[in-house]
Amino acid sequence: MASRLAEILRLKHPPLAIVLAEEKPDGALQFKGGNRGCVAAMLLAATRGRTVAFARATFGCPGGGVGLGFGDTYAGTPVDRLLSTGGRAELPGGRTWDMGAGERFFGSPETARRWMHSLPFREIPAAYVLARPLDETTGGDTPALVWLLANPDQISALVTQIGFRRGSIDNVVAPWCAACQSILFAYAECAREQPRAVLGFFDISQRHSIDRDLFSLTIPYGLFLEMEAGAEDSFFQTGTWRKLRERQ
């Protein structure tokens, strides 16, 4: 699917289709079973033209499993301590994990657990989560979500475009979560009568992997189609937008 919005906005990176699938496409990039890795880094690889695939045995890290919708993959891990005050933890098999001083995103393990308990965990009804450039999807692919990277001017335009036909105020939710977990929150938005987009990539541990002026926006596919349909009639045709586009 060619995106008119991506063309108008002059996005630096192509939007990605997040597709729930029962089979892995030939040639898809995938973590090896049991190996750790970063889902956000794989999404960035997809913006460079790759198809990437994730499964319940290959989601990279516990936070990635949660973000992709493979259930509560935090269970049984000391992530509450990792995200807060750190220390040493005993792992299955007699291993020890020294987390140092922790990431200090939360003031205590108890606070981190409150955040964890508020996550909208999902068990997706598919074997794989695929990410590939949206313009490479075919008629057989129906994305669940569209994930893109945009700068503040482009984000402003997308937030405005959501309300073009709705007349809505509450167009975007901006939860704090791991960089990949905007996908999880967008799954939850799909269940709402009026889904919102999810602004993200606030994860301090992953901000270094993208340009300093970029954030992610994860959009339920039905909402994205609604936004696309109004692109030729909205403010994108005005001098107001042209002034902003000149500095892209």
Image (cartoon, rainbow, N blue to C red):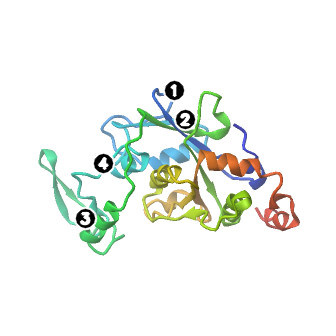
Residues at marks 1 and 2 touching, judged by CB atoms closer than 8 Å: yes
- Please give left or right for residue 176 compared with residue 113 in the image: right
Give the residue at mark 1.
25
Q: Foreground: 124 or 241?
A: 124
First along the sequence among labels 3 and 2? 2
Instruction: Calculate the distance from the C-alpha at mark 3 to the C-alpha at mark 2.
Output: 34 Å
Instruction: Calculate the distance from the C-alpha at mark 1 to the C-alpha at mark 4.
Output: 25 Å
Q: Is residue 85 visible?
A: no
Instruction: Calculate the distance from the C-alpha at mark 4 to the C-alpha at mark 2.
Output: 24 Å
- Please give left or right for residue 120 compared with residue 45 in the image: left
**Mark 4 Cα shell of 10 Å, populated few (<14), some (14-19), many (≥20):** some
Instruction: Calculate the distance from the C-alpha at mark 3 to the C-alpha at mark 1.
Output: 37 Å
Residue at 52% across / 60% down in the picture?
200
Q: Where is residue 140 in the image (x, y as percent from the top left)?
A: 60, 27
Give the residue at mark 4.
73
Give the residue at mark 3.
81
Residue 202: which numbered mark, if any?
none
**Mark 3 Cα shell of 10 Å, populated few (<14), some (14-19), many (≥20):** many
Give the structural element (helix, strand or loop) at label 2: loop
